[in-house]
Every structure is written in C-alpha cells, then in structure tokens.
Image (cartoon, rainbow, N blue to C red):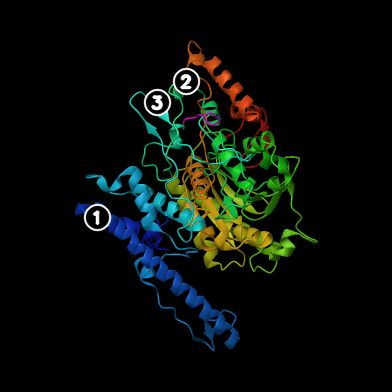
Amino acid sequence: MSFSSRRRNYLLVPHRRDGLIECMKSMLMHSFVLDALDTTGADTFSHFEVLIDEHIAMSSQHYRLLDTNSATSGSDDGIVCGGHSTLIPTPSRLRRLVPSIGTFHTRLPLRKAFEAYNAKYGVTKRRYICISFNEIRHILNLAQIIAMIQPEGEGPSLLLGEMKIDERNEVEVLNYSQQKNVDGNVCNNESHESSTSPDEGQNQHHPLASVPPLQPPRSHRPLDYHQRTESDAIEETLNLLPILHKPLPGPKLICFDGDQTLYSDGANFEKSPKLAKYISMLLQHGVTIAVVTAAGYEYQAAKYELRLSGLIAYFKERNLEKSDLERFYIFGGECNYLLRLGQDYRLHAVREDGPGGWMISTKYLVESPGNWCESEITKILDKAEACFRSSLIEQNMRATIIRKKRSVGLIPKVDEKIPREALDETVLRIQAELEESKVALPFCAFNGGRDAWVDIGNKRVGVQVLQSYLGIPAIETLHIGDQFLYTGNDFAARSVCPCVWITSPEETTYILKSILRLAGVPLIASMNLMVGEEKDGMGQQEQQQNQGRVLGERTGKKKVDFEDVGRRTSMVQMDVYTGEFIGNAIRK
C-alpha cells in the first residue's frame, strides 16, 4: 500500500471524532460567532430533534419494507433478489449531514436537556469560549436518560433539588416537603437535618434540582471538607430516605463498562461509596445491573470479585436481599463468560449448556457465542497476533504480546508506556486486516488506553445476549461506557441499545444520581449530624469518628470503610492483564 493510500485511508477514518457531536458543534459555532447563541441555541437543538425523529421514522419504515420484501421474495437479506437491488433506502437528512450516524432507539428531548444544562452552566452567556465537544456530550447524555425515564414528558420535574450557600458558608438543604417515609410519617428537618455535599449541588441552577427547602437549624454547620478523608466526606454526606421497593421507571437493564467507568483504568472498585450506594439503590428498585467488561479471566470468579471488591463489600454491609443480589451480573471477555452474584456475596458461573443455559437459550441469535466454531476463533486470533507482532516491530514499541483463550493483546512492559498514536495505528491495522479477511465471527479490536486488544465477540453481542436471556427489550436497556470512539470497545453497543458516554467514574456517579432523581427516588444528603456545640474543640480525627458513630446510631447500619477495603485488597493484588495473583507487586 502506498504512502498516499495509507494517508487517505487514515483521514477517512474519524477514529478520534464523533460525527453527530461534531455536526452539532459546527452548527452552534455559527450562532456563537454571531453572538446569537442565547436566542438561537435552543432552536438549534430543536432542529436536531426534528432530524432525529425523521431519521427514526425513515429507518423504521425501511426495516418494515425489508421484512415484507424478505417474506415475499425468499431472499435472506431482503435486499438482493435475482441479482438486482430491490430496496435502495432514501437517506434521511440527518444521514446526509452525518454519514456515520447510527441507530436511535428513543427520541431525544435535546432542547429540554440543553435548557437544563444552560440553566446551570450559562453556556449561552459566554463571549469567548464556544460550547465544547464534552458539553454537547453531556447534553446528549442528559437527553437520553430523560427520554428513557420520562418518554412523554411526565413524572418529576427535570429540576429536582438545589442547594443555596450564603456568605457564611451555611448550607440550606433542600428536603422533599411532605415526603412520607415507610412508616407513613412526614419527613421533617428533625429527622433529616442535613446539608448537601459539594457534588450534590453547586448552585441554585442545578439541572436536576428544584423543590422548596426545609432549612436545618443554623447551629448545624458542615465539617470542613478539606479536613476529612474522601471516604468519610462522601459516605457520611450521603444518607438516603428509606427505600420504597417499587419498580423504577426507565431502564430495566443497565450495563456498565469496567475500567474508567466503574473504577479507574487498571484499578479496582475501592473508593466509590456514592457510586456503590446508587448501584445498590437501582438493584433495590428492580433494575438488573450487568458489568460488561473486556477483562477476561474465564470463570475464575475470585479475580472478578477482586476487581469489584468495594462494591461487593458495600452490598454485604447493606445486607441486600437475595432477589436484589441475583440481579447483578458480570459478563467477562466482552460476551464470553457470564457470572451472577449469589446470596453468599460471591460470583458464580451461569450455566452455559443444558436447561436454562445462557448459551443454549440464546442460540437463535446468529452471533451468539453458542454458535461459534473453535477453528474460526483460532483463525482470528492467529491473524490478530501476527498483526500485533508486525506492528510491535515496526513501531519499536516497548510492549509484550499475550494470548488468552478468547483474546490476544498488546500490553506495555513494566514501567513503560505505549503512545496513544501507536495503539490507534495498531488497532486500525488489525481492524482493516480482519475486515478484509471477511472473518465469520464478531470481533472487537480496540485501544484500551494503555494497551490494545482483539477479543472474540464484542459488547453488541454481550448486550444482546443479556437482553435475550433476561427478556428485556432494547428500549429498556441502557449501556454506560467510556469507549465510544471508533477504536473503542463500547462503540458496538450503540446498535443494540441506548447508550450514555462518560469519561470517568465520577461522571458515571452523576448519571446514576440523575436517573434516580428523574425517576422520583428521593435523595437526601445527611452529613451534618451533630450540633455545632458538640464540634467545638474537637480534633479532625475525633470529629470523623464521632460523625461515623452518630451516623451508625441514627441509621442502624454500619459504615463501609472504603479505605480499609483498599488496604485489604492491596494485600492480595493481581496483574489486571494476565489475571495472575502477584502478592504486593502489582504491575502498572
């Protein structure tokens, strides 16, 4: 292949861009340059709503015609019959603008989401900085969860709680007036005296907050956040009203990526008490949770448990019911190893074959792992490994190639780092090689941030298998991940369910909080449990210990020490690439 051909192919692959977001950003730029974003910004998002609605309608009509044509002509794909094309779909206006546009599973109330986002951040008031890629991504995320929870615009207001901070840093906590607890008693500021944490609300324009507050006594002042550990500051701040175990409106299945979505890349779930609390609340409201991760340790449950140690410890301390625990799954190797949490707080392999086996029950899906041939798997992995080796040599990468049963990867040597450009180049080479070879099985070649992998199967297959096995339709499924670029492994999930694109576990936490609030689940922050007089003269450590003691007395529950979880898991560490337990010397 010539240099010009390589350059042309590289430019044709927008592996670091998203077509829809770039198109939105381009259109909003005109309004910004003309200093008209304040008056026309919302209209621009309304226009995209119309384009998306039109695209959904035309796509639905096309699929109906395909079904009719396939039934009458006997053609397998419904498009080619007798050597001639019988259906040439007319592209929608949105597809003409964004040729790479994919599938929309719901309408997107973009204007509503933009107005909420703008109310908090005032993006239309800016004079020098136009709306950014990430801001449009946040607006799309917000629109997606609104669409799933309030498809007809019904239910709780988009603005569900706010916090006002006066000049003396006294926090007025918004309570849910006339909100009844399980015993039928009205919640008041005696039983729920509290103040919100910094991330529970930044100002009175929080996009998910707006109920009149019940003010706590002035003597209740929050602790200095800078004098408290992260675990204490978060866990003691967030106390939730008694949970009413009723089905949650919106998604019935929420799938998560692992690295950089639930925990930092290459780390374990150890320091996210808020995220753990929100996930447990979703389970208690009937939502099925599945971690669909590229980490493939076959059916060695202890290795997955180590990666999710803090989350499972939180479930155990909160004594979740058996039915809630059994709605927690992990799908390792993209779609190869399905495990389920049991009443003993351990992960157990889900039977593949026989009655109720997940492979047997999903065999009707063309791409289901139950239909894969071992010889084809070997063929794909051999090609990928050869491509990895040539790329490693040509780009002088300080890396090692490892091969597993259903994957092959390029990982950095100890204390080394592979440049992002080298990883992208390697992934694009392998994608081109395998696509040209017309391999028979689904695969996923992706840049993991520090490494590159080729997996047999992908997250499209993983989510589809879960939908089929659990009987949950695509419109009630939500996938949350950070790898939605062309070289990412969450990209494939877009075709089978609505998705939310995040970039960190903190963003995942905010998304789950937004889902719960929009669904009408009351979230009351409770950090300020002691009167001001009791705090006078206390040292930092004494304040923290007393705060935890009072919290335990009032809630009747133990506080999970996430820092202790981290210390305990550090005693037995694991190479996240190979899955080997390596004592105290985990490689980075």
Check contact, mark 2 vs mark 1: CB within 8 A: no
**Residue 218 screen position, x and y as percent:** 43, 23
Indicate the amino acid at tag 3.
Glu
| Secondary structure character of the magenta stretch overall | loop
Whether 310 is drawn above or below 384: the answer is above
In this view, the residue in front, 556 or 564, is: 556
Give the SS element for disc 3.
loop
Check contact, mark 3 vs mark 1: CB within 8 A: no
Residue holding disc 1: 39
In this view, the residue in front, 289 or 585, is: 289
**Residue 89 screen position, x and y as percent:** 44, 78
Give the SS element for disc 1.
helix
Q: For marks 2 and 1, give the one nearer the viewer.
A: 1
Whether 132 is drawn above or below 91: the answer is above
Give the SS element for disc 2.
helix
Distance from label 2 to label 3 (Cα)?
A: 17 Å
Badge number at residue 227: 2
Q: Quadrant of the C terminus?
A: top right
| Magenta region | 190-195
Q: Residue at x 51, y 58 (%)?
A: 498
The local crowd at label 2, few if under 14, some if 14 to 19, many if 20 or more residues have their Cα within 10 Å, is few
Which sits earlier in the primary sequence, circle 2 or circle 1? 1
